Image: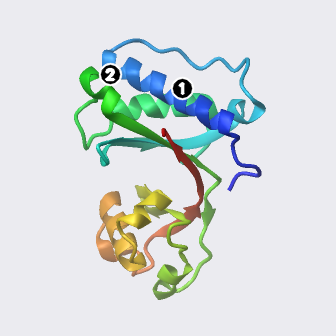
Amino acid sequence: MPEAPLTPDEQRTLLEIARQGLVAAARGLPTEEVPLEGLTPRLAAPGASFVTLTRQGELRGCIGGLQARNALAEDVRQHAIAAALKDYRFEPVRADEVDQIEIEISVLNTPEPVASLPPEELPGRLRRYVDGVILISGPYRATFLPQVWEKIPDPEQFLDTLCNKAGVPAYTWRRGQAEIFTYQVESFHEK
């Protein structure tokens, strides 16, 4: 986790930035980078985030990054726009559905490699509902946020499904043919 949690005001600011990005994207309007003046040091500092869009409880888009490359506020803006328009699993968000979409933001800490251990011990090393997991096998990679544990609570199935998401056979992790990293998130959503 980050050193200190985001304040309620910082969370509200990020949700407002994400909402503005979503609305502009759905309406085809241009957007500008978030100005850093006036932001708290935490929001102006580099940060990595995922923005998840849901409609009536169903996933509508989710895009994010694993490494901090931009100010956290700008990272959130870019991922809100990308979740609305560029998640290959969904059609772009339409202007007429924006009011029905709820935004969730997950702010990531720095991923850490899981210590080298026999593959059969890996599922026991993962903390369900706490750890986000990154799987890398050669040029293939995928991640699941900690929230995915709610849908896939079994660690072995979680890893098998993560392999499938990465485009590699489900047994890849079982054969020790993947690097595994974990991270945690601070997650919050519109009320």
Mark 1–mark 2 distance (CA, rounded to whole Å): 14 Å
Secondary structure under the numbered disc 2 in the rendered image: helix
Locate residue 56, reporting x and y percent: 29, 43
Tell me if mark 1 has few (under 14), some (14-19) or many (20+) residues whose alpha carbon lies within 10 angstroms of its own.
some
Which image quadrant: the N terminus?
bottom right
* Residue indicated by mark 2: 26
Tell me if mark 2 has few (under 14), some (14-19) or many (20+) residues whose alpha carbon lies within 10 angstroms of its own.
some
Q: Earlier in the sequence, mark 1 or mark 2?
A: 1
Locate residue 8, reporting x and y percent: 66, 39
Q: Residue at x 60, y 33 (%)?
A: 12
Q: Residue at x 49, y 29 (%)?
A: 18
Task: Tell me which corner region of the image, top left, top right, bottom left or bottom right, holds residue 46.
Answer: top right
* Residue indicated by mark 1: 17
Can you tell which mark lies on residue 135?
none
Secondary structure under the numbered disc 1 in the rendered image: helix
Q: Residue at x 71, y 48 (%)?
A: 5
Residue 76 visible (yes or no): yes
Disc 1 to disc 2: CB gap under 8 Å = no
Residue 85 visible (yes or no): no
Locate residue 119, reporting x and y percent: 47, 83
Question: Depth check: 32 or 139 in front?
Answer: 32
Amino acid type, label 1: Ile
Horizontal relation, residue 41 to residue 71: left or right: right
Horizontal relation, residue 56 to residue 187: left or right: left
Amino acid type, label 2: Ala
Height in image: 66 above or below 73? below
Q: Which residue is the extreme one toward the front?
A: 191
Horizontal relation, residue 144 to residue 94: left or right: right
Task: Tell me which corner region of the image, top left, top right, bottom left or bottom right, holds residue 171.
Answer: bottom left
Height in image: 188 above or below 9? below
Q: Which residue is the extreme one toward the left?
A: 91
Locate residue 11, reporting x and y percent: 61, 37
